[in-house]
Image (cartoon, grey):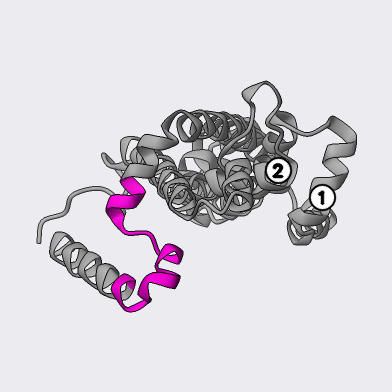
Amino acid sequence: LPLAMGVVFIGIWYAVRASLGDERAFLLPTPDEIIRAFGDHGPQIWSGTVNTTKGAVIGFSISVIVSFIFALILSLTPLIRASLYPYLMILQMTPIIVLAPILILWVGPGLASVTIITFLICFFPLTVNTTQGLISTDRNLVDLFKMCKASKHQEIFLLRVPAALPYFFTGLRIAATLAPIGAIVGDFYAGNSAGGQGGLGFLTIIFSSQFKIAALFATAVASCALGFAFAGIGIGLGWFSLHKWHDSYAKTDS
């Protein structure tokens, strides 16, 4: 069915292109023109994809580590959550378009700024989901640990963290989807082509200024492929960690 719908979609694509006429046809390049654009601008698109992947991977990895630690802190007491959560919301609600110029002034354009922007975009869903998992542990199990005189350290790492893994991987899947988007947006606002560091976001500026529509579509395809790769990694990690024991992944008899 997806293949059949893809054929229908491409057919509609060519029909719409034909209806635009010769004067406006360049606004919607056909799939074969996009493929040719990959051939014409392959080195640029490949280099941009590699640079975007670097920013996405570094920012995403740092966000996973920092958000997990921050979630552990937030889960300790309601007082800590009430004290810190509003500032977490402030960080999330501040538009990247405002933060980008500040980051450029602080750390300069290029990979450093792109990494920080990616980190900021991924940090919130990871922290919120992991915190919710840590504080949603079955109360009966928590009471059992207390009855057995388990230490706070044992309660957190032997009970709460395993119980929070499904929540954590839900946040991981969301963050994995956002990571390449964050890197591309960061590169668009804070990217730098010096030393071949420009990513896909920077390429969109270049191709747009040169009015290379087919190359822009090719860049969009590369961005989409990168997003699918990150989403697949997030889903794969969740399956690998949970499929043997959690209901959301474990096979059940129908």
The alpha-carbon separation of the residues under discs 1 and 2 comes to: 8 Å
- 3 left or right of 58 in image: left
Secondary structure at badge 1 equals helix
Q: Quadrant of the C terminus?
A: bottom left
Q: Amino acid at mark 2?
A: Ile
What is the three-letter code of the residue carrying label 1? Leu
List the single residue furthest toward the bottom. Answer: 19
Q: Are marks 1 and 2 in contact (CB under 8 Å)?
A: yes
- Secondary structure found at label 2: helix
Residue drawn at x 76%, y 62% is 93
Residue placed at 82% from the left, 50% from the top?
A: 99
Mark 1 or mark 2, which has the lower sequence index?
1
Which percent across, then down, holds residue 159?
A: 50, 40
Magenta part of the chain: 17-35
**Residue position marked by numbered label 2 in the rendering:** 117
Residue 235 in the image: state x and y as whole percent. Answer: 36, 44
Left or right of 109: which side holds 175?
left
Callout 1: 10 Å neighbours few (<14), some, many (20+)? some
* Residue 4 part of the magenta-drawn span: no
Quadrant of residue 244 within the rendered picture: top left
Residue at 75 percent across and 54 percent down: it is: 96
Q: Give residue 99's mark.
A: 1
Q: Main secondary structure of the magenta part?
A: helix
Residue at x 54%, y 33% (from the top left corner): 48
Q: Nearer the viewer, residue 155 or 188?
A: 188
Q: Is residue 149 visible?
A: no
> Are there few (<14), some (14-19), or many (20+) residues within 10 Å of tag 2?
many
**Nearest the camera: 90 or 55?**
55
In this view of the protein, which residue sits in the foreground, 216 or 96? 216
